[in-house]
Image: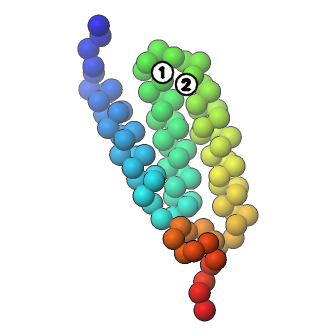
Amino acid sequence: MESVSLLDIILAASLILLAWRLVTTPDLFKAAVLFITLSLLMALAWVRLKAPDIALAEAAIGAGITGILLIDTLGRLGPGRRGRGDGGGGQAG
């Protein structure tokens, strides 16, 4: 059995903290950027677990394609509908 290194502990802690921050942030653009960062760190975790094929898929699909689609969708929504918790309807008059 291999011992757990300090890098593995830091990686696991940062994944948990980043996931928590991703779920609790009210700004959708920030959430999309945090999602991309989480996917890249998860790809690094897969490499540490000696699963490079899954790491490549996570980086390409999770961070690459999905991240680009999330940011593109936010760009199409417009500035009035980018935050959570506003009822989905922009400015109240």
Q: Residue furthest right?
A: 76
Quadrant in the rendering for residue 10? top left
Sequence order check, earlier mark of 1 and 2 = 1
Along the horizontal axis of the image, is 6 left or right of 89? left
Q: Nearer the viewer, residue 88 or 16?
A: 88
Q: Tell me: residue 47, above or below residue 17.
A: above
Disc 1 + disc 2, Cβ < 8 Å: yes
Report the amino acid beneath label 2.
Answer: Ala
Q: Residue at x 60, y 37 (%)?
A: 62
Q: Residue at x 48, y 21 (%)?
A: 47
Quadrant that contains the N terminus = top left
* Residue 61 at x, y percent in the picture: 65, 35
Callout 1: few (<14), some (14-19), or many (20+) C-alpha neighbours within 10 Å? some
Residue indicated by mark 2 = 55
Residue furthest to the front in view is: 87
Left/right of residue 35 with respect to residue 89 in the rendered view: left
Q: In the image, what residue occupies the spot 47% across and 15% down?
A: 50
Question: Marks 1 and 2, Cα distance to the nearest angstrom?
Answer: 6 Å
Q: Give the number of callouts.
A: 2
Examine the rendered structure and indicate whether residue 84 appears above or below residue 43. Answer: below
**Residue 55 picture quarter:** top right
Q: Residue furthest bottom?
A: 93
Residue on which disc 1 sits: 47
Q: Position of residue 70 (x, y in %)?
A: 65, 52
Which quadrant of the figure has residue 11? top left
**Residue 42, image x, y percentages:** 48, 33
Identify which residue is drawn at 37% across, 41% down. Answer: 16
The crowd level at tag 2 (other Cα within 10 Å; few <14, some 14-19, many 20+) is many
Look at the numbered disc 1 and give the secondary structure of its residue.
helix
The type of residue carrying mark 1 is Val
